[in-house]
Amino acid sequence: MVRTSVEMEQEGLITRDEALLRVEPAILEQMLYPQLDPANKTMPLAQGLPASPGAACGHAVFDADRAETLGRDGGQRVILLREETKPEDIHGFFASEGILTSRGGKTSHAAVVARSMGKPCVAGAEDVSVDVSKREAYVGDAVIKEGDLITIDGSNGDVYLGEISTVEPEFTPELEKLLEWADDAAKLLVMANADTPDDAQRAVTYGARGIGLCRTERMFNSIERLPIVIEMIVAETNEERKAALDKLLPMQREDFKGLFKAMSPYPVTIRLLDPPIHEFLPSERQLMEDLDNLYHLRRSVSGMDILAGTMALLHSPEDARREAAEMRGYIELHVVEEAIAKKETMLQKVRVLFETNPMLGHRGVRLGITFPEIYAMQIRAVLEATAECAKEGIEIHPQVMVPQVCTAEELKHVKQSADNIRKDVEAAVGKEVDFHFGTMIEVVRACMRADSLAEEADFFSFGTNDLTQATFSFSREDAENKFLPMYNENDILQDNPFEVLDVKGVGKLMELAVKWGREVRPDLKVGICGEHGGHPASIKFCQKAGLNYVSCSAPRVPVARLAAAHAGLMK
Amino acid sequence: MVRTSVEMEQEGLITRDEALLRVEPAILEQMLYPQLDPANKTMPLAQGLPASPGAACGHAVFDADRAETLGRDGGQRVILLREETKPEDIHGFFASEGILTSRGGKTSHAAVVARSMGKPCVAGAEDVSVDVSKREAYVGDAVIKEGDLITIDGSNGDVYLGEISTVEPEFTPELEKLLEWADDAAKLLVMANADTPDDAQRAVTYGARGIGLCRTERMFNSIERLPIVIEMIVAETNEERKAALDKLLPMQREDFKGLFKAMSPYPVTIRLLDPPIHEFLPSERQLMEDLDNLYHLRRSVSGMDILAGTMALLHSPEDARREAAEMRGYIELHVVEEAIAKKETMLQKVRVLFETNPMLGHRGVRLGITFPEIYAMQIRAVLEATAECAKEGIEIHPQVMVPQVCTAEELKHVKQSADNIRKDVEAAVGKEVDFHFGTMIEVVRACMRADSLAEEADFFSFGTNDLTQATFSFSREDAENKFLPMYNENDILQDNPFEVLDVKGVGKLMELAVKWGREVRPDLKVGICGEHGGHPASIKFCQKAGLNYVSCSAPRVPVARLAAAHAGLMK
């Protein structure tokens, strides 16, 4: 279809506009991900949620370290299979072809990270029960052992035992051509959500005209950095927190430089830290289970010491000590005690940080205001990276974006701090350092207060994932597993509002916010950086609502470019 | 002030309006709750959140059973002191003068229940650490032992060691007179939030003109009912669930009859089940700790059996059995095993029902649609109670209200079921059974869709607690403990939006909803039943926004009546 459309235009049979309109954006989507061989007749073993599109096959592994050993180091294709994933599993994502989880919805950690990496993911396959200790998973009578080949189809949620052959995507010259035409026809700019220089590079390949969303928290997830982030979180004093942040500063600066260079000369939008910080810590349940095991171990080790004592009465003391040491496998009691103390401290911290509704909790700009040193570090890293790029003669357009804003006072607070840091950096480099300052619009109140926010912000970016959650009072993770399917079946809701932008509710709020915002600042740049930014019907709405740009994950950029052209050609 | 105002009017020195305007509603508030003796010079021991106004003194008790033993049965004044409270503690509330918790905010279970009962409560006094097993609490070096006298001031959050004398409230004839005038001057009707016939009775005393909110889940919390509710929740099949609901039906019917009678001839608004059902279950942490203890016990009991076996080799089997039984205090292994099995099943269920953000989860009408038999039971109970009251010649006006609605389809769904049940009940009694059908407006999307909701609903009731949470994306429990105080100190927010209605954000949404709703149904009745319904400044806004009524907890009704008069007299 893509080829014939381009050829027909070149033969003068149809116009460029007609060529563009012949190709449905949804078709592109299929072209851009590996698909299961259409000839496949095998029945799936289980089904989960289609959490990140594309098909992948690999050997099942049950933890991230194993994925790295077999996948990255051993050169095997692996699928990471877990009950759910956590930030500390991130190295396992890099090493895997795809991700399969038995718990969680389409905004679970596994789903969001897989999508941002463009890796297939099936999430919340609830029929699969995982036993990490045995390195096995069960589906009814079937057993998946570590190393068994499995295939997942992230486009529909199917899980297969064994290998199903896949068809690779193709990015043909005709497609390139069509998308160039699309960019000319489109009124909306298409940007990408990208968190690393690699992501940014890929986004450029897919034709993104900038980064609309860089989630800085993703930069905190690597194995080298997570311990420092945890130091920052468990810090008891501002000084301790500052010390941890000082270690993170040069890393973030390099991250940003990498992004700026990859994306030059297009703008790069850096979102300051957003998630509740306890997301970086292990779960209470995990810690309680670990501690339980450690207490057991302590009892055994102590028990063996008693046994050693008893034996010393019967035999020689030498023999007794030797035998005891052998029995306890050289585990010294004090080592166990230290491990216990560490876990107990962590458990205490996790409980202090516990939130009833973390989605609505201490996160985003609320963290930025209660712990100003975190945002200060991030802003400094952006501005220092900006100054360094300028020195190297690289054209860049940095944009700092504040998440979870609900009142203009929050923005003023962060802007004040940013201005101070700017002066500082400018004094150090002896040059002007320029950046744009904007806000996410993802809290309902931000829509209601768009007029006063527009006085502080150069740009608005709608975070429609969170805005949809807040507008419906639906927690996506809970809704998609518990009642949304039934709502769709009974036609109470026709679409899943997390996939198709809810024009009548969320869209109405967006229209009000654009209207009120531009009344104060007519040249306000407005975009969208939720997942809806890559959905054709939602893109159509975005143009109608007067947005300037959409930003979506890199692999969806071509779809968005074509959809933006279709929207642009609408009468 | 109240007395002189009334006297001056009666002497013809001022008009009634002037008399009303002389008395600030906030002053009334102080009159209606017990206060600490103003001469008190003692320094407080600790401070928590002022979660329910009034002062109380009593002997500290650390669990609800003990509160009942000493308080209800022993005739002592007790203060229930807990880390946090759960629905199973409800009998302890009834038996106590006041509640003190070391964890949780102003919408914690303790706070909300205490307010609805009109009992003083200090919540989230984080300096107090509670050790239930030792029956002690600690504040720095000070120890509160069970039985020690403590005093709490729920109006400012202070906690004292020992007894501080209190001043009782007075509901004088002059106040009665002033409030009668207030009712004449007011444009807004004042109703009460009441969950039991006792509450309703008290609300009548305070001059409420109906019940604007009856939270039916409160009826599920009593000790006799909770086990049946748990049966309903853990039911594996619809039949099992139905069987549990059949037991609840006659109880709910009696509840409603009691309310209707107490409130006749005024309307009674019954809100169908709202909270996530896992709120009725114990916490995962509690269950894990209980199980850990039980596993311990099992090991000891088994160990004693082994010991008994060993002894049998040494002594006579008879002696061994006897000694073993003595040692294990007659705990039979199978009893322990059964307890473990029960707790393990419960833990599994709690984990299945676990929600990441319960505020935004499977609750309200979402439950009503996924488990239609729950709402069907409640609606049947309302209509049967209505029919029985009619038969007894009691004038009543029942209103059924659906919580957490975000789309008109949800309302249609419940209305359809209600109409079927109505036909059923009418056929059984051979008479018409009438009721009004309405919706809570507490989800942002409900405001955006007010036009289509008004086609289904006879009335709207703004649930401004939840609406405020959703508009700000603030979870109240997390916000008030973690960042709201700092937001207020730094003037990022001038008021706590959970206490003073946020006119610029939440209020704007309300105004839009009223406008759009009345465009479709000009005679739409609109009210508010969040806590703001009792706050003078918020009541002023409610009148400006065109509401018909406010509903607040019974003890605030007099304040609301005077505030409504002030609003009515505004030029």
Image (spheres, coloured by chain):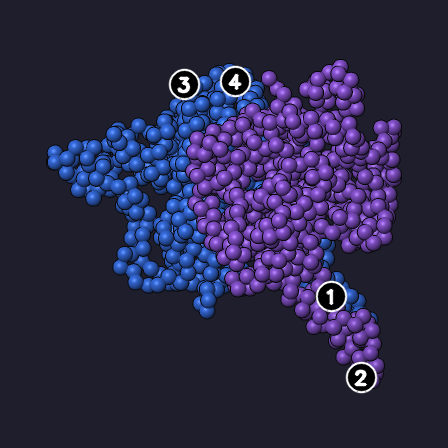
Chain colours: A blue, B purple
Residue A546 in view in this figure? yes
Q: Which residue is mark 1?
A: B297
Q: Position of residue B9 (x, y in %)?
A: 75, 19
Instruction: Please tell me which of labels 2 and 1 falls first in the chain.
Output: 1
Give the residue at x 80% y 32%: B170
Vertical position of residue B282 compared to residue A423: above or below? below
Which element carries disc 3, helix, strand or loop? loop
> Label 3 neighbourhood size at 10 Å, few (<14), some (14-19), many (20+)?
few
Callout in the foreground (1, 4): 1
* Residues behind callouts 4 and 2 on a single chain: no
Per the rendering, the mark at residue B317 is 2
Give the residue at x 76% y 79%: B309
What's the chain of the residue with tag 3? Answer: A
Vertical position of residue A314 compared to residue A177: above or below? below
Callout in the foreground (4, 2): 2
Q: Amino acid at mark 4?
A: Glu
Q: Amino acid at mark 2?
A: Pro
Instruction: Please tell me which of labels 4 and 3 falls first in the chain.
Output: 4
Of all residues shown, which one is farthest toward the front?
A: B393
